[in-house]
Image (cartoon, rainbow, N blue to C red):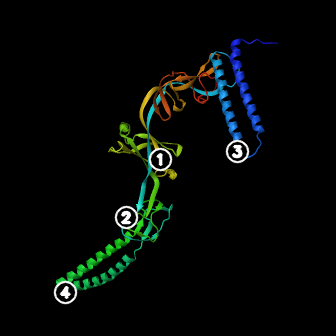
Amino acid sequence: MILAVPNKYTKGLKSTLRLSALILLVLTWGMQSCSRESPGSDDDSHTIRSQIDEYNEEIHRLSQKVNELHRKLNEQGEDTGRNDHVPVTVSEVEPSLFTEYIRVSASVEAVNSATISPETNGHILRLYANKGEPVKKGQIVARLSTDVVEGQIEEVKTNLQLAETVYQRQKRLWSQEIGSEIQYLEAKNHAERLSKNLETLQSQKDMAVMKAPFDGFVDEHHIKEGELAMAGTPVMQIISLDKLYINADVSESYLPYVSAGEEVVLRFPAYPDVEIAVPVHRVGHVINPENRSFRMQLKIKNENDRYKPNMMANISVQASEIKDAVVIPSMLIGYDTQGHYVYLAEEGPAGYLVARKAYIERGRDGEGKTQVKDGLAEGDLLIRKGHRNVANGEAIRIESYE
């Protein structure tokens, strides 16, 4: 039995069949060529792989041409007999509230961080806390050698005992009007001077002891035991991660949108799933003339010491709100020579759904969303999942609605 087919259908189908046959021919040729190659050296394997890559590229180009012919048949209202409509997920366009955010980069700083240094010169006698060890406020963490000062203290103590004895005797004699007043005053002055010298030496000895100013842990040693430390020389770094500052230099053009107490959104690139609402702790009162910016600072509690000083952070500041705006995810927007576009799901000439490229006028962006000023209407079916796999006029099937 011979079945007659209208000429308008045969023209496109013949082209499709010719291309499909060519694809099969290329595949067969590639398999035969590969089978003729005997497994030998690495050079032979490299040649085979190169040929396979070339054939795959050719198959891809031919498949694109076949798909293009199918799309042309779809546009003419003809059924190509294909069941491989691209699966997509769509959502209905509807007005919503659009919030514009300003995003600025920031860095992390510990609220409590101190460099421990001696107040006098001396050799490091001992470091009492190793790197990474926790310390308590007031705990001794390092000590200088105090042999010279201790020797001076013992000498002054001996002289002071004698001076006190002489002073007490002169005092008794003077109370009995024996001796001269000048001898009594000299003995008193000498004893008081030695007493003050002893206090000074004791203070110098105390300066050789370095203590932790707050609870934290030792982050770094800058000097080793036995080395000479001068007054002000860094010995170790003590840090506490309980509380952190988040510092950002913000352009002065954003000054109207930032104020102390205003809530912002804090994120960390190292933890992409973390999003924290934090009030602004402080806003700088001076504009930096070099980069025309001001300092914005947040303050947060750092549970489990998760965040570290000098980490990068991002702060999003709300700039404006637009009611009843058409808002779509920014990732759905493409761009070509004619402008920005998205794909919509619409009924095609043959009665099934196709993807249609819709050009839009793009508005403001914020937090991964974009305001669309023109090009979309309420009720349009916006292709979301699968938008990268479709072309204009290509047949689609909707798997789900969002």
Please tell me whether mark 4 or mark 3 is closer to you in this view.
3
Within 10 Å of disc 1 (Cα), the crowding (few <14, some 14-19, many 20+) is: some
Q: What is the CA distance from the residue labelled 4 to the residue labelled 1?
A: 81 Å
The kind of residue on which mark 1 rests is Met
What's under tag 3, amino acid-wise? Asp
Res. 395 in view:
no
Quarter occupied by the C terminus: top right
Above/below status of 123 relative to 398: below
Please state which of the two labelled residues, at mark 4 or mark 2, is closer to the viewer: 2
Q: Callout 3: helix, strand or loop?
A: helix
* Residue named by callout 1: 312
Q: Quadrant of residue 319?
A: top left
Instruction: Say which residue label 3 marks.
Output: 43
Dot 4 or dot 3, earlier in sequence:
3
**Residue 172, image x, y percentages:** 23, 85
Circle 4/circle 2 CB separation < 8 Å: no
In the shown orientation, is residue 299 left or right of residue 61? left
Q: Are marks 1 and 2 in contact (CB under 8 Å)?
A: no
Q: From the top left corner, tell me how far across and down residue 33 is, in percent.
A: 75, 36
Residue 2 location in percent, x, y? 80, 12
- Distance from Cα at disc 1 to Cα at disc 2: 31 Å
Q: Secondary structure at mark 1?
A: strand
345 and 30: which is toward the camera: 30
Q: Residues within 10 Å of mark 3 (few under 14, many from 20)?
A: few
| First in sequence: mark 3 vs mark 1 | 3
Helix, strand or loop status at disc 4: loop
Q: Which residue is mark 4?
A: 176
Contact (Cβ within 8 Å) of mark 4 with mark 3: no
Q: Which amino acid type is shown beneath numbered disc 4?
A: Gln
In the image, 83 versus 111, the foreground residue is 83
